Amino acid sequence: MRYKFLIRLLGPALFVVILLFFIDPVHIIQAWRSLQYDFLGWSLLTVPFIVAVRSIRWQRVLASFGMPYTVWTCFRYNFVEMISVAVISSAGSLIKTFYLRRDGYSFSKAILSIFSDKAFDYLLPVLFGIFSAVSFYFNLGPDNALLGFLVLIAVLFKPVQMAGVSIFPKTIPKRLKTKMSDKKWRFEHHFQQIVTALDYRTYLLSAAGFLLYYLSIYFLNLGLGLNFGFSQIVCIMALTSLITAIPISFMGIGTRDAALIAAFTWYGRSAEEAVSLSLGLLLLRLAIMLMGLIFWYLDPPPLAEFKKGRNG
């Protein structure tokens, strides 16, 4: 496990290199001094709607596995998840697993529902990122690229669904697979449940969540005076998400900056502007964590059960 931690230090190291050799910090300070706080407020206001959409989706997935929950409960659990997922992506999902365990559901069923809920979140950024890279390469233009995104969302449901079902068993860590096998859990027996969970509504809710996320960043970009159009932000962030998925950083520090610099260069913008937006995204993520602390305080995650599961 130590080597994984060391690998994640590559991102912060890259960030230091960017600060020392590629940007002028004075320009970044000037951008933040002229920050328009009303747009920052709109960016933050979008976050609960993103979580609400994903909570509606998770409620539907839970129901398909025989676990009835309200949207409000899913909303609270999702916000708590965001605190942990900011540090280690799997930790947030594990915390939700043990909320479900505390509520009396089996470990295997909890894992099944959570990984089903995340399937489109894993696949859609890859699809969007590849299409964004293609749009940059062929110079399609941001408006045409956005139209292409919407067409892809409309027509690629079935391939993405089957890819999610096929990839699903491979996304479960070996340790969890062993534990589930010990409980006589078999993926094949739950195939139809997973297909049912990953239906068209779940797919559209996933896509809507991403579009709301891009809207939040669009407001942030206006607040920083960058003035990219919405379609440009979609293209930039889709490409950036593909690169930041590489697990060599904490909260995307360094990798996100490098990806944004590359995308901004395509539009003739400076590295300082790219890093300004990157710092804004980091601030947004920290603000989301603070929101999550409210729900953490109201209903703390069952950490004793969490530690027991990790040691078991």
Image (cartoon, helix red, strand yellow):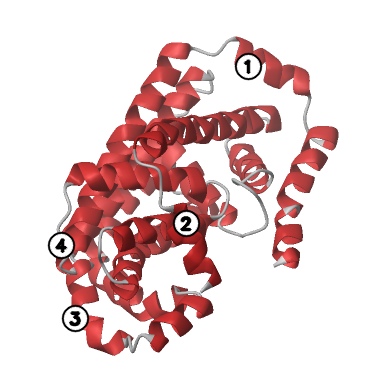
Q: Circles 2 and 4: CB distance less than 8 Å?
A: no
Depicted 129 relative to depicted 294: above or below: below
**Disc on the earlier residue, 2 or 3:** 3
Q: Secondary structure at mark 2?
A: helix
Percent x, y for residue 282? 57, 34
Depicted 178 relative to depicted 47: above or below: below
Q: CA distance from mark 2 to mark 3?
A: 33 Å
**Disc on the earlier residue, 4 or 3:** 4
Amino acid type assigned to the residue bearing label 3 in the image? Gln
**Disc on the earlier residue, 1 or 3:** 1
Question: Mark number for residue 192?
Answer: 3
When asked about the image quadrant of residue 31, the answer is top right
Amino acid type assigned to the residue bearing label 2 in the image? Ala
Disc 1 target residue: 31
Q: Secondary structure at mark 4?
A: helix
Disc 4 target residue: 63
In the image, which is nearer the foreground, mark 4 or mark 3? 4
In the image, which is nearer the foreground, mark 1 or mark 4? 4
In the image, which is nearer the foreground, mark 1 or mark 3? 3
Residue plotted at (61% across, 41% down): 260
